[in-house]
Image: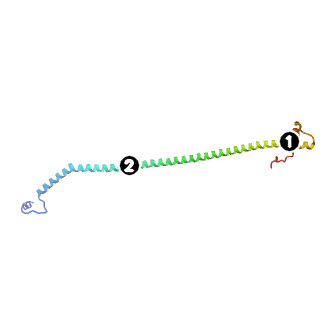
């Protein structure tokens, strides 16, 4: 090796590096590694950690926002379903109320109609009774006059006249058809 070192001054072998360059290169590399390890890599680690935290925090915030949105959507759907149920219940109540009102109005109309018909029947019966009394009295007077002409004596006496009329009407009542004289 000594011969090799001696030969070094004469001509340099390109495959074997010069020891001074190797020493300076090694010291520069060590200084560079020290500076990078002391200042640059911790900052890079801190920056990477901040970026990871920001990304993970952003993802976490996005997931939280998505969960909140899903919860709000579910709450909205539930409120919408409740509103629809309430609207259906109100519609059904309104229909039931309308049916009840219609039924009540129809019932009142039937009652009023029945009352008016009954009042008409009562008035008709009263009028019929009045007409029957008037006709009986008139028939009685005519019968007394006719009987007086036939008998030849005057039936002007009131008591006799009343007896004659009542007897005549009784005979007519017995001779009346079974249907009550209605045609």
Give the residue drawn at x 19%, y 52%: 33
Above or below: residue 32 compared with residue 145: below
Percent across and percent down for residue 82 are 50, 47
Query: Residue 141, which numbered label?
Result: 1
The colour style of the image is: rainbow
Number of marks in picture: 2
Percent across and percent down for residue 70 are 42, 49
Q: Residues within 10 Å of mark 2 (few under 14, many from 20)?
A: few
Q: Secondary structure at mark 2?
A: helix
Give the residue drawn at x 13%, y 56%: 22
Q: Secondary structure at mark 1?
A: helix
Image check: 141 left or right of 11?
right
Q: Give the residue pinned by disc 2.
A: 65
Relative depth, front residue between 148 and 134: 148
**Which of labels 2 and 1 is toward the front?**
1
Give the residue drawn at x 56%, y 46%: 94
Percent across and percent down for residue 117 are 71, 45
For the N terminus, the quadrant is bottom left
């Amino acid at each position: 090796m000594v011969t090799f070192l001696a030969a070094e001054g004469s001509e340099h072998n390109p495959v074997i590096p010069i020891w001074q360059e190797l020493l300076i290169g090694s010291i520069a590399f060590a200084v560079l590694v020290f500076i990078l390890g002391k200042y640059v890599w911790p900052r890079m680690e801190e920056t990477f950690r901040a970026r990871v935290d920001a990304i993970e925090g952003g993802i976490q915030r996005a997931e939280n926002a998505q969960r909140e949105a899903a919860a709000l959507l579910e709450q909205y759907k539930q409120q919408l379903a409740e509103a629809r149920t309430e609207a259906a219940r109100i519609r059904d109540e309104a229909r039931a109320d309308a049916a009840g009102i219609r039924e009540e109005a129809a019932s009142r109309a039937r009652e009023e109609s029945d009352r008016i018909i009954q009042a008409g029947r009562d008035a008709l019966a009263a009028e019929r009774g009045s007409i029957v009394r008037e006709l009986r009295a008139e028939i009685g007077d005519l019968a007394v006059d006719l009987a007086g002409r036939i008998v030849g004596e005057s039936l002007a006496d009131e008591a006799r006249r009343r007896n004659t009329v009542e007897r005549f009407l009784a005979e007519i009542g017995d001779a009346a058809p079974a249907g009550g004289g209605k045609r």
